[in-house]
Image (spheres, helix red, strand yellow):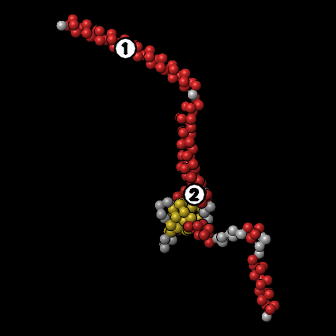
Amino acid sequence: MKKNFKTVLISALSAAFAASLSAMTAFADDASETANAAQQSTGSVFTTLVLPLVIVFALMYFMLIRPQKKQEQELKNMQQSIEVGDEIVTRDGIIGMVVRIGKDSIVVETGGDRNKIRLKTWAVAENVTAKERAAAAPKKDNNPLAAAGLSDESGSKKSKKKKDNSEE
């Protein structure tokens, strides 16, 4: 019985070895055919693999990275344009009036007791006074003649007043 088991085991191993050898040669033939096909269709590989990756990275840049950099630049410009007397809000929510400006820090006066706090300029989140100035600034006319200086509405009003005075 042991002898039969050994012969069955040896024949099974030899059959498995033969099957794996024939499978490897068939796979090698198949691989060489696909390698030839791949060399012929490198353009299609570019369009199916590389082009979508490039498009995804471009979308990520324009949707995520570029707006964030623009926002950081605006914040940096605002922090550099702080003047004495401006009302600011820090990242921690402290509201105060700028008393003194240093190289990389500012002194802010807060509260009714006029407490003074020294802060780094990067801690400023909002310049309230600058926003109020921008909102109070006179809005420019969209009239192209007025922008070019060809239309003088104030002069026409004066001439109407002169006409009214001359009629009386």
Residue type beneath disc 2? Leu
Foreground pick, 64 / 142: 142
Foreground pick, 167 / 124: 167
- Disc 2 target residue: 75
- Disc 1 target residue: 19
Q: Position of residue 135 (x, y in %)?
A: 60, 70
Residue 119, placed above or below residue 97? above
Looking at the figure, which quarter contains the C terminus? bottom right
Q: Is residue 52 visible?
A: yes
**Which label number is shown at residue 40?**
none
Foreground pick, 50 / 38: 38
Q: Is residue 107 visible?
A: no
Residue at image location 66% in from the left, 70% down from the top: 139
Residue type beneath disc 1? Ala
**Label 2: which secondary element:** helix
**Label 1: which secondary element:** helix
Residue at image location 57% in from the left, 28% down from the top: 41
164 displayed left or right of 79: right
Residue at image location 54% in from the left, 39% down from the top: 52
**Where on the picture, by quarter, is residue 88?**
bottom right
Q: Position of residue 126 (x, y in %)?
A: 54, 63
